[in-house]
Image (cartoon, helix red, strand yellow):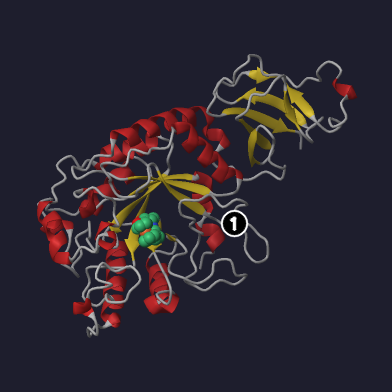
């Protein structure tokens, strides 16, 4: 039996992944929650099933874009809350094979991303607004939650649980090695054993012992001895945990923040509120500086294309990653406090200073006097000098500090200029 520590090794090394939300909801183009938000029935949603024909779906291009951005793994929605399956499940007709797309889109995704050397994950919604045995009336989120037609309906939740377990088994059987199973999500009493989560996870571990599982089946991953279904990593959504994530014993635990590029996960034609590349780069750095990963989302459109705006951001991030990836991959938090001018990431005796604020004069490194063996600008490898500025001995707070002179009034990279500090052992 492997341990969580074994399983998460690659994950904590890789640090940066691509989240992909794609399904029938790309056609109405109002995000993946529209059925619940607008209380849309299965019948009203059916035209999108009949029209789904992503003529430009080319997962090889998605994989190339992810790779060029410096992302090392991806997670695609095999099934979202609407219940529609991008894969050829034998347990439902509500799947891509029965739409004009006419084929298993998960299979193509997995082959394409593997071919680019990326790890592959599958998002699977444990909530299902299509399955007849999922609770409807009175549920907190279901599109039919207020529809009295469904009041007192005789549903058999155990049928749904069997279906859900069966689909997870299919996903772990038909596509070779899966690197991440990203379940979404538990709420109220719909958590843990309600999903027969221990049985589910035991099946998963017996089939694919190395697969990573997120923490949304329920349980409490922060316990000293978490439940078997509490998962391998914590999954903050649309937020970077201010102080990272620790367990009850105050030990850091693996986590991955999932973040949208605009304000929706699924394709939304009118949402142009995109983050800047600088914001994305600094968000990735913030995650790593707090010991976590970033899973950055794109929502391909009805034709199967990642929006141009998203691709443009990924390209800029990729250029920065090619120059500065050493300050991300395999790195984690530093024991040093957050510096005034930016953030630190660290791996072994390599400390990476992410300088956001140029200030005036040399950059000050509290506590590093006599500890820097070498300093370089990471982007181009050029040498930087540790120097004591004129009269600095007389300043009161520099006893333990070091200074590095960056020539020029502006930073070489105003998004994030990285200085690599090789520390003495
Ligand atoms: O798949 C993405 C979301 O659809 C899913 N998790 C990510 C990865 C998610 N489902 N629910 N939630 C996240 C939290 C629920 C938020 C809600 Fe709402 C607030 C549901 C109703 C009010 C957000 C705003 C969704 C609809 C309106």
Residue at (60% x, 47% y) in the render: 290
State the residue in front, 263 or 289: 263
Q: How many marks?
A: 1
Check the picture and name the quadrant holding the C terminus. Answer: top right
Q: Residue 133 location, x and y as percent?
A: 24, 78
Q: Is residue 178 visible?
A: no
Q: Where residue 388 sits: x, y (%)?
A: 81, 20
Where 177 sits versus 279, above or below? below
User: As rendered, which of 236 and 263 lies closer to the eye?
Assistant: 263
Figure quadrant, ligand 1: bottom left
Above or below, comparing residue 269 to residue 413 in the picture: below
The image quarter containing residue 343 is: top right
Please give the residue where the numbered disc 1 appears in the rendered image. Answer: 245
In the picture shown, does residue 363 fall above or below 332?
above
| Residue projecting furthest to the right | 394
Q: Secondary structure at mark 1?
A: loop
Horizontal and vertical percent position of residue 64: 32, 36
Q: Is residue 357 visible?
A: yes
In the image, taking residue 158 as reference, residue 204 lies left or right, namely right
Q: Say which residue appears at 49% left-offset and 45% top-offset.
A: 14
Vertical placement of residue 155 versus 421, above or below: below
Q: Quadrant of residue 166?
A: bottom left
Instruction: Please report the residue visible at 52 percent of the width from the left and 74 percent of the height from the top.
Output: 227
Q: Residue at x 51, y 59 (%)?
A: 234
Q: Where does residue 168 sit, x and y in percent of width and height? A: 31, 67
Left or right, residue 67 beside residue 10: left
| Image side of residue 39 versus residue 290, left or right | left
Question: Quick one: 334 or 411, which is closer to the camera?
Answer: 411
């Amino acid at each position: 039996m492997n341990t969580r520590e074994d399983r998460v090794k690659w994950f904590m090394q890789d640090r940066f992944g691509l989240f992909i939300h794609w399904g029938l909801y790309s056609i109405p183009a109002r995000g993946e929650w529209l059925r619940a938000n607008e209380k849309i029935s299965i019948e009203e949603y059916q035209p999108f099933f009949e029209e789904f024909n992503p003529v430009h779906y080319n997962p090889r291009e998605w994989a190339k874009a992810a790779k060029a951005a410096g992302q090392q793994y991806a997670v695609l929605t095999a099934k979202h809350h609407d219940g529609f399956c991008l894969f050829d499940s034998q347990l439902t007709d509500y799947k891509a094979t029965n739409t004009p797309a006419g084929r298993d889109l998960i299979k193509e995704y997995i082959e394409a991303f593997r071919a680019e050397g990326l790890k592959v994950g599958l998002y699977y919604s444990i909530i299902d607004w299509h399955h007849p045995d999922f609770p409807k009336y009175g549920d907190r989120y279901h599109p039919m939650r207020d529809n009295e037609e469904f009041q007192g309906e005789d549903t058999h939740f155990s049928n749904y649980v069997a279906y859900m377990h069966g689909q997870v088994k299919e996903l772990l059987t038909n596509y070779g090695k899966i690197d991440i199973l990203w379940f979404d999500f538990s709420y109220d009493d719909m958590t843990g054993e309600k999903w027969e989560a221990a049985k589910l996870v035991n099946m998963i571990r017996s089939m694919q012992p190395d697969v990573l599982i997120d923490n949304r089946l329920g349980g409490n991953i922060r316990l000293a001895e978490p439940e078997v279904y509490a998962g391998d990593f914590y999954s903050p959504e649309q937020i970077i945990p201010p102080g990272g994530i620790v367990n009850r014993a105050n030990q850091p635990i693996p986590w991955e923040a999932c973040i949208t590029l605009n304000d929706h996960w699924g394709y939304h034609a009118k949402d142009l509120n995109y983050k800047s590349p600088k914001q994305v780069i600094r968000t990735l750095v913030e995650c790593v500086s707090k010991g976590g990963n970033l899973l950055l989302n794109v929502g391909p459109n009805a034709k199967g294309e990642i929006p141009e705006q998203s691709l443009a951001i990924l390209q800029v991030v990729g250029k920065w990653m090619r120059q500065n990836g050493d300050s991300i991959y395999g790195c984690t938090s530093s024991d040093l406090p957050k510096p005034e001018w930016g953030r630190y990431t660290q791996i072994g005796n390599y400390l990476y200073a992410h300088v956001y604020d140029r200030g005036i004069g040399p950059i000050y490194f509290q506590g590093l006097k006599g500890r820097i063996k070498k300093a370089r600008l990471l982007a181009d490898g050029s040498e930087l000098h540790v120097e004591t500025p004129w009269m600095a001995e007389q300043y009161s707070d520099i006893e333990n500090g070091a200074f590095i002179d960056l020539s020029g009034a502006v930073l070489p990279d105003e998004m994030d200029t990285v200085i690599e500090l090789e520390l003495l052992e």
